[in-house]
Amino acid sequence: MIPYGRQDIRQEDIDSVVAALTSDFLTQGPLVPAFEGAVASAAGAKHAVAVNSATSALHIACLALKLGKGDLLWTSPITFVASANVGLLCGAEVDFVDIDPETFNMSADALARKLDAAEKAGRLPKVLMPVHMCGQSCDMEAIGDLAKRYGVRVIEDASHAIGGQFQNQPVGACVHSDIAVFSFHPVKIVTTAEGGVATTNDDTFAERMNLFRSHGVTREPDLMVSDSHGPWYYQQIELGLNYRMTELQAALGVAQMDRLSEYVDRRNQLAERYDAALGNLPLKRPGRLADALSAFHLYVIRVDAEKRRAVFEALRGDGIGVNVHYIPVHLQPYYKALGFREGMFPAAEAYYSQTISIPLYPGLSDNDFAAVVGAIEKALA
Ligand SMILES: *Cc1c(COP(=O)(O)O)cnc(C)c1O
C-alpha cells in the first residue's frame, strides 16, 4: 500500500537520537531548548514551547489565554477533532465557522457574519482557532482584522503548515494571531514521532505555556508568590500537566528541522506534478491563495459525491492508501450529543462528501507517483 503520508528518516536522524539516548539527559536536557530554537527561528517567532503533541500545545495555548467555563471557542468544522476538543477540555463551549469551499479553510466572510450576529446576541467567542488546512494558511489578514475588531484572541492550528508562508511571512510568526501551533506527528511535514510546538511573540503567553506544560510549577523566584525557601524550592502557582517533550523526540526534531525547506520544496514539486497529471480528469484539484505558500501536508482531490465511495474503494483496492480529511467535527457523535446537526455547516459537509487525500510525502518515488495517477485515471474512467 502506498500510504497518503509517511515520515522521512535518514542516518543523521538516527545518529542524533542515539547520541541523545546515551547522553546525560533523556528529558529536561539541552535538546528541547535547541529544538525550540530551531522552530522559533524557522517560524520567525520570539518564543517556541515544545510539548508531547500538538493537542497538548493547543490545550496549553487555550489555558495561557485563560479560556475557561462560560467562554466560547470557535474553530473550523474541517479539522482533526483535537482543535475543538481542547476548548471543551478547558470547560469552554465550542462552535464552528463554515469553510471557504475553494481553500477548505475557515471562511472570513462566514466569520464576519457570525461575529456580527454574536455581538448582537451578546455572546462573542473568547478564542478563535483557524486551521491551516492541508498546509495552506487561512486568510490571516482578514481573520486577524476581524478578531481585533471584536476583541477575540486567535490561536492558529498550524499543525499542517510548518514551512508555509502567508504574505511572505512564515506561518507561526503570529503576525495576525496570539499563538500558533505545529504538530510533529509522523505524517506531518517534520516529525518528532509525537510532538507539538506553540509559538508566540508574547512573553506572558510563553511563560504561562511553560508553566502549564510542567505541572504549573516554577523554580523562578520572580514568579513565586512568596519568598523562596532556598535553592531546592519550587512553587506550584497554576494547575498544570506533564506535557513535556523528551530529549529523544527533540533530538529527532533538531535533525529533521535542518531539512524543513527541502521538505516543503519537494511537497510543492509533487503537488505541481499532480496538478499537471490530473488536469484533464473529472475531479477538482486543491485551490490556492495567491499570497500563500502551502507546506502541502495534504493533496486533496474532490470528485462527485455520488462517486466518492466507489473511487475511494477502487484506489484502496489498487494499493493506494487514500484517506479522507476530515469528517466534519460537528457530525461526530460526541458533538451531535452537544446539539450539533447535519445542515449546520453546509460548505464543510459538501466538502466532506467529495474529498479524497492522495499520497504526498517527500519519499514518494516516481514509480509510486505514476501508480497513483494511473489508479485515479482508472477509477474515474
Ligand atoms: C495532527 C493534527 C492535530 C493533532 O496533532 P497531534 O500532534 O497528533 O496531537 C491537531 N490539529 C490538526 C489540524 C491536525 O492535523
Image: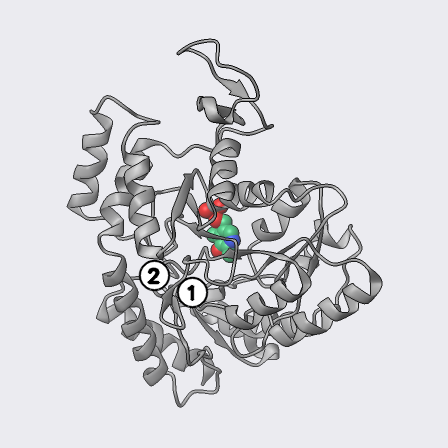
Name the one closer to the observer, 94 or 231.
231
Q: Position of residue 331 (x, y in %)?
A: 69, 59
Q: Is residue 104 above or below residue 55?
A: below
* 379 relative to 64 in the view: left or right: left
Q: Residue at x 51, y 57 (%)?
A: 156
Name the one closer to the observer, 237 or 26.
237
Q: Secondary structure at mark 2?
A: loop
Q: Which color scheme does this rendered protein use?
A: one colour
Badge 2 vs badge 1, beta-carbon distance below 8 Å: yes
* 144 relative to 194 in the view: left or right: right
Kindly identify the amino acid type of the residue bearing the numbered disc 2: Gly
Q: In which quadrant is the C terminus drawn?
A: bottom left
On the image, which quarter does residue 261 sit in? bottom left
Q: Residue at x 52, y 37 (%)?
A: 208
Q: Position of residue 250 (x, y in %)?
A: 31, 38
* 216 relative to 275 in the view: left or right: right
Q: Would you name the residue on which mark 1 appears?
A: 135
**Number of the front mark, 2 or 1:** 2
Q: Is residue 111 above or below residue 62?
A: below
On the image, which quarter does residue 279 sit in? bottom left
Label 1 Cα neighbours within 10 Å, binned few <14 / some 14-19 / many ≥20: many
Q: Secondary structure at mark 1?
A: helix
Considering only order in the chain, which callout, 1 or 2, is on the residue closer to the N terminus? 1
Q: In which quadrant is the N terminus drawn?
A: bottom left
Q: Position of residue 113 (x, y in %)?
A: 72, 73
